[in-house]
Image (cartoon, rainbow, N blue to C red):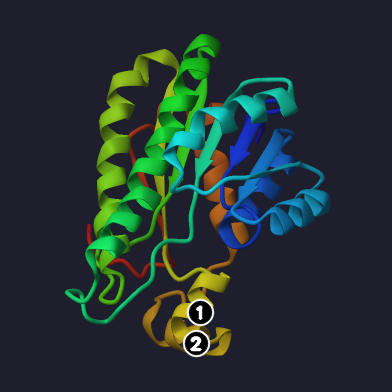
Amino acid sequence: MDLGITGRAALVCGATQGIGKAIAAELIAEGARVAITSRSRERADATAAELGVAGFVHDTADADGAPALLEAVADALSAPVTLLVTNTGGPPGNPDALAFTKDQWEAAYHELVLGPMALVQAAIPAMRAQGFGRILNIVSTGPREPIPNLMLSNTHRAATMAAFKTVARQVADQGITLNSLLPGRIATPRLFNLYGSREAAEQVAASEVPAKRLGEPEEMAAAAAFLLSARAGYVTGQALVVDGGLTRAV
């Protein structure tokens, strides 16, 4: 299937490992011109060299830096960004949902709501001018079925999903879509850290996930590539769960 994104400029945030890196690699394979971000200059440069893309330093929580980032990426790729992936690892967990401090709540809000929406705001004008845009937020199944130890992620990612749904309706007639991708138990460093090791995460997945295994980042990337494609122009304001059947909600 030709996804119709050859030559388009793509920005994938948080793309030095895990799901973000897999999405960047998938978009490259589909012919897009790709830029990636990381909080770390060292990781951004190393992954950019590995993938053959442009690398930028950006903290998703830095809402004020979003316009300058979009401009710099457009200059580097010689085209405005029309494929945008907002992705970040997320705030810390705690089994006590009431144990988070005010500062932690505010930091999570900046990282998971204000930062991604600043990127959306900065990207949409150029997408309008092009008559084409695809925006995808990497979320979690937490907003659909709250994960016990991830109070901050559950709450703030749900807010961003609602924001994407709201904006999607406003720009649907302009060739721009906004969707959310909800990963379940995907084999990423963040998941391994949450469970203590890859082996522990795999054991839990074998007992709890109907597919009896962890998902691979490349499986997330395949779903992302479709939602970012020209072929998905009539899919907007949606939340696609990729979780091996784990989520019970209809």
Could you tell me if residue 57 is visible in this image?
A: yes
Q: Image point 51% across, 68% down: which residue?
A: 186
Could you tell me if residue 187 is visible in this image?
A: no
User: What secondary structure is found at the residue carrying circle 1?
Assistant: helix
Image quadrant containing the N terminus: top right
Q: Are marks 1 and 2 in contact (CB under 8 Å)?
A: yes
Furthest residue in direction left, as rendered: 98
User: What secondary structure is found at the residue carrying circle 2?
Assistant: loop
Q: Image point 34% across, 61% down: which residue?
A: 141
Q: Position of residue 60 (x, y in %)?
A: 48, 47
Mark 1 to mark 2 CA distance (whole Å): 5 Å
For disc 2, the marked residue is: 196
The label on residue 201 is none
Q: Quadrant of residue 78?
A: top right
Residue 63 vs residue 139, the one in the foreground: 63
Residue 174 vs residue 92, the one in the foreground: 92
Q: Image point 42% across, 41% down: which residue?
A: 116
Q: Is residue 138 left or right of residue 26?
A: left
Is 184 above or below relative to 160? below
Is 102 above or below relative to 192? above
| Amino acid found under the numbered disc labelled 2 | Gly
For disc 1, the marked residue is: 193
Q: Position of residue 174 (x, y in %)?
A: 41, 14
Image quadrant containing the C terminus: bottom left
